[in-house]
Image (cartoon, grey):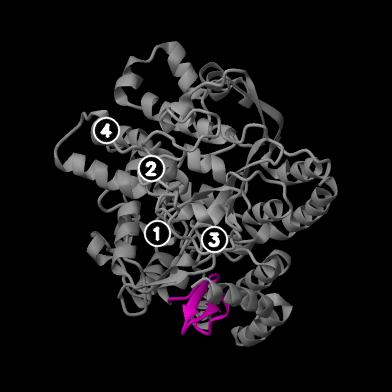
Amino acid sequence: MKKKLLALVLSTVMIAGSLAGCGKSKPAVTETPKPADSGTTDTQKPADKDIAGESSKSVEELLLEPYAEPVDIHVVLQYKDSEDPDTPEGVTPEKSTAVKLLKEELNINLIYDWVVNADQFKEKFGAELAAGNLPDIFLLEDPNDFEDLASQGGLADLTEYYEKYRNDDLDSIFNYDGKFINVGKRDGKLYGLPMGTDPAQMTSQMIYNMTQLESVGITSVDQLPKTIEEFEALCDKLMKVDYDGDGKTGGPVIPACKNYMDAQLADFQPFFHAYETWADGWYDKDGTLQYAGIDEGIKTTLEKLNQWYNKGYFQKDFAAYDIWAADSPIVNDIVAGKYAIVPASWWVPNWPLNTNKVEHPESNWVIGPNLSPDGNQPTIMIDRYPVNKFVVVGRNCKNPEAIFKMMYWSLQDTLKKSTPEYQRAMTEEQKIEWHSNVYTWLPYRIFSPTSLRTNFETINKLVSEGKTEITEAEAARNNEFWGAWDRYLKYKENPNDGVAWGVYFSRLAPDGGVANMIKTVETADIIYDEVYITTPSMVSRKAELDKLRNNTFLSMVMGETPISDFDKFVEQWKAQGGDEIAKEVNEWYQSNK
């Protein structure tokens, strides 16, 4: 097995280097997701599948039952600082609340074999893998890595444990629709718990600062542009005025970055979407999958973006800037109020616009209509099954069921301790413990893909009923609900609280990010990116093909390559592996319809 894993790490390291500029990656599966059949229709009934002679106990009792003897679970960590500003200094992953309570309540010793920063993780993970060292439980943030490890025999089969320990709370995380769990299966065996998102989160939005737009005569949301022509007229006006108060005119007026199609912030997605074009994805065209990134219609999108570039709408060297780089100048300019227009996604009010709101309380951000040539809602493309991470168990783990116990424990602990009653009654010691529980330091997530919609609908119903205090029975059972409810109450108390505004406007406001996201998918014609697999040619060719596409499109926007060369790009894309991928995905699609 060590020889197999050595071969795997070589491919993993190669993939890591080539994926640096990649957009979304997709997991490989060998079957079409279909409703999972657990043999029982009520997951709350006592477990009737006997793995350890505990058939008389309910699923919930088994999940929260401590081990009779200590169980060591070895993990590794791609370290990121806590998102909670109140996390005490000196708290480390090894000293976090979860480590302490998992020992006290489940008799699990969570042992961090190694911890490295995010930019060092691939190299470290590859070296450990080459040495035959797999953690017991870990989070794979690249679906290609999941495919490799599953195919090479590096992962434990979780099928039996899933059937024993599944319940509604856990299924809401990794099997929210009764089908999603199958994305983690290979040949009928479950090798990973998929961590997904709501497909609607792929939609784009245009966000405007009404305070700044007053300088060009726009005083109501009804005046915001609906057509590309109207949008261009607005940009022309902004080029002529000092709307941000820095004493200068002439642009740029739209933030842009090298991550032109996958950043969901300061990217070109809303403009591609306006013309019903997409830089990636495989959609069904007359029964055959067609790659969207080579569609003829993209020429029109690139021509318009090139016109805007030449007019000065974008910073001349925008392609040199990564939106996710530390201390990104693009983000800094947005926070500083340099832009009255921000191409975005639903979450952007929660960052970085919340910081802008803190520094500039007068900012009045609103979401405008989705742009199109004629002002009508354009057709949208969304993923059939969006997944970006897998929670997996190493093949040598002695207690694979521990992942289900840990995830369930984390969810119940969060639900209990995030209620207003518990928060108000916390002692100083409990507050320290609460803020020392950093979810990104755990080898799993407990986010439910349906939580955004559920919380939006639940909280707005409570608001319509005039409620400011609610019971646990009225709350949604997901890890984000109480935090969202708390921010709503804080926003209601002080609408100028920029942090509370960010959560409220992104997630809860009737005219906010999630609301617009839901409205878009409910009113637009939809085509689906049908491919949720990684084929062999994708593993070997997709990264280079994406690089070819990205470099070509950016070069065309900046006028370095004539758009008339688009057909040459298509020929290159096909010759360098695109045709091979098309053949593989269509063979899979035809056999799994």
Q: Earlier in the sequence, mark 3 or mark 1?
A: 1
| Disc 2 versus disc 4: nearer the observer | 4
User: Which of the 4 image quarters holds residue 463?
Assistant: top left
Q: Which residue is mark 3?
A: 262
Q: Which residue is mark 2?
A: 357
Residue toward you, 448 or 152? 152
Give the spatial CA distance, label 3 vs label 1: 15 Å
Helix, strand or loop for disc 1: helix
Q: Are marks 3 and 4 in contact (CB under 8 Å)?
A: no
Which mark, residue 200?
1
Magenta-tinted stretch: 276-297
Let me know if residue 263 is in the magenta part.
no
| Number of marks present in the image shown | 4
Give the spatial CA distance, label 3 vs label 4: 33 Å
Kindly identify the amino acid type of the residue bearing the numbered disc 3. Answer: Asp
Kindly identify the amino acid type of the residue bearing the numbered disc 4. Answer: Leu
Residue 39 appears anywhere in the view: yes
The vertical placement of 82 against 332, above or below, is: above
Residue toward you, 232 or 382? 382
Q: Which residue is mark 4?
A: 489
Task: For label 3, count other residues whose C-alpha is less than 10 Å away and answer few (under 14), some (14-19) or many (20+).
Answer: some
Let me know if residue 292 is in the magenta part.
yes
